[in-house]
Amino acid sequence: MTPLKNNIFLRALLREPVPYTPVWLMRQAGRYLPEYRQVRAQAGSFMALAQNPELACEVTLQPLRRFGLDAAILFSDILTVPDAMGLGLGFVEGEGPRFQTPVRTESEVQALAVPDMDKLRYVFDAVSLIRRELDGQVPLIGFSGSPWTLACYMVEGCGSRDYRQIKTMLYQRPDLLHRILEINAQAVRQYLNAQIQAGAQAVMVFDSWGGVLADGLFQQFSLAYTRRVFEGLIREHEGRRIPAIVFTKGGAQWIEDIAASGCDAVGLDWTANLAQARRRVGDRVALQGNLDPMALFGGDQAIRSEARRVIDDFGPVGKGGHVFNLGHGISQFTPPEAVLSLVDEVHAYSRRV
Amino acid sequence: MTPLKNNIFLRALLREPVPYTPVWLMRQAGRYLPEYRQVRAQAGSFMALAQNPELACEVTLQPLRRFGLDAAILFSDILTVPDAMGLGLGFVEGEGPRFQTPVRTESEVQALAVPDMDKLRYVFDAVSLIRRELDGQVPLIGFSGSPWTLACYMVEGCGSRDYRQIKTMLYQRPDLLHRILEINAQAVRQYLNAQIQAGAQAVMVFDSWGGVLADGLFQQFSLAYTRRVFEGLIREHEGRRIPAIVFTKGGAQWIEDIAASGCDAVGLDWTANLAQARRRVGDRVALQGNLDPMALFGGDQAIRSEARRVIDDFGPVGKGGHVFNLGHGISQFTPPEAVLSLVDEVHAYSRRV
């Protein structure tokens, strides 16, 4: 494999000295880019795009051609794993993902099993292809939904405002939910390891819905299973440490617990205060985040001043430990020029301070 | 006015000794009760119900006939104030509230003014009537949306997932947003004061959307204006202190700031840890919360054990300072028997410990 030309992102994650703050954006390959919408239309459906390694590679690389981002992230969906379990993933236009057969009854839970990773071959093929095409330009991030977040979709069947189905299961039949989570943890571990073997140089667990759990239950039903994923993760590959990031939307108040999960970095949303977060976790983990994606609608000046605020909040740049990102995925309505301003300011300002 | 037969709620809010933990539930008068649905059908529309003092009084009292709750809360809507500003509130079935004329442009903001409180007479009439009908059984809580939460609806025009309209204004034209918030703060203060004069014995500010703001901006655009409301609030009436509660969904990490806003109590959602919250604010304010409303779907045993967990988390009952509540409004799908179990357990267990 070609050596990396830009490893600032990996060094920041491992809290090694860096010349500037690296930046990438959650959902950076996506609908806000006209060239993405073109490939998406060509593919016919979101899943057809995700399941075609050549097209997935193409959209992964698109934002890197426009912006000086410091990492690429595999284009895929967090629901590929439950789809491979046979739940029948579909996307309803304007409504988001939906499973044909949600998992709710005791017999449905009993029938659940870790999927054959061969069904996810298209993901690993995309990872290999992207690594080859990147040619060492920047590192490639692999990812998965967290066991809890996958379970939310598997039990609810689709997005939810109140998580009533899965929480009813949690309070009434915690044994069933623990069984789902145990299977998910095994599946996610195998899935991430296969991505690492295919060439992912860092991995990220998206615990998008951990923040809907009550304090105490978050630790039992979300974080405990993310920890199990990390316990069995390949941590060194091609002679290099594979950093693991975990992002719990709305999880800032549990940062000490999250930092102790076995990850190298904790992603934070924009409600968190980075200075406070750093005081709380010290040098134990790096932090990733945390600009409000809506700040990208503020125009050049506001984008730059908000970017500086995030960098100042974190504190000293040179020691590493901070990866600049949004606090959530970029909005599909974002003007691409906004990302140009952001990346420029993060690099220029962090080099200066 | 008849003296109060049960003032445990008020005493807990003022951190005075109590024999047990008082309990009430956000949205306790609502769709989960068949008798509410009957009155709602009779009224024809949600706003027709809210604007009819007799019917509003009737639905306010309904949950008290079923459950041994320690407080009543005025049945109304948080959007009555912007409606009185002339924004044209309507409710679309299955979609929630919508304003005909949202406030977005400079001229729309300039045209905005504190409404004549006479347009909200129906609210104050309802408060007087409820106080009379309660006949001292339990205290009556008046309420309002926070200046920021009202502004969210006024600018977005309806509920939102990303708050793109108001955040675009915040980042591009903070001056316009500050003007809206200043008007809202004045209006909310007058509105709550008129409720107090009509007989409300405690008031609550619902900052339902404060938690969508970035750290730093929450303090500037939400909390600063809630503080202005409290600064001009009538704090004594009928010879008694009027306690003020503020509830910011998702605001647990800002609890020290919120506690310093001039309130007597801080409401917390279920993601907060009550023990930690108490350590952070000490004896400065009382705490209200914080059971996940979804726990009410767990069946009798789970409801009781989760209720005990919340009480244990808070700590010593006898000194006051804790009002038991949900961490958000009760779900319309809740079986009413669940509330019976909850109220029973809160009272019985807190008397025992």
Image (cartoon, coloured by chain):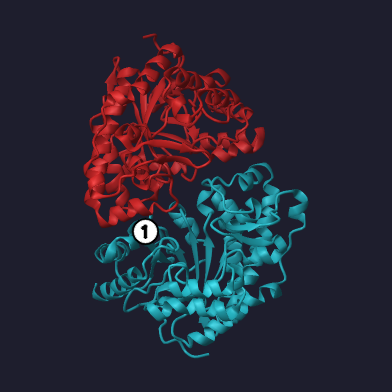
Chain colours: A red, B cyan
Residue B186 figure quarter: bottom right
Q: Is residue A169 left or right of residue A29?
A: left
Q: Is residue A207 left or right of residue B114?
A: left
- The answer to whether one can see residue B308 in this image is no
Residue B201 placed where, x, y %? 51, 78
Residue A204 placed where, x, y %? 37, 31
- The answer to whether one can see residue B305 in this image is yes
How many numbered discs sit on the rendered protein?
Answer: 1
Above or below for A278 versus B32:
above
Residue B167 placed where, x, y %? 61, 45
Q: What residue is drawn where x is 39% and y is 45%? A: A251
Q: What residue is drawn where x is 41% and y is 72%? A: B24
Judging from the image, what secondary structure is the residue with disc 1 in? helix
Residue A180 placed where, x, y %? 26, 43
Residue hosting label 1:
B294
Other-residue count near label 1 (Cα within 10 Å), few / some / many at <14 / 14–19 / ≥20: many
Residue B147 figure quarter: bottom right
Residue B14 figure quarter: bottom left
Q: Amino acid at mark 1?
A: Met
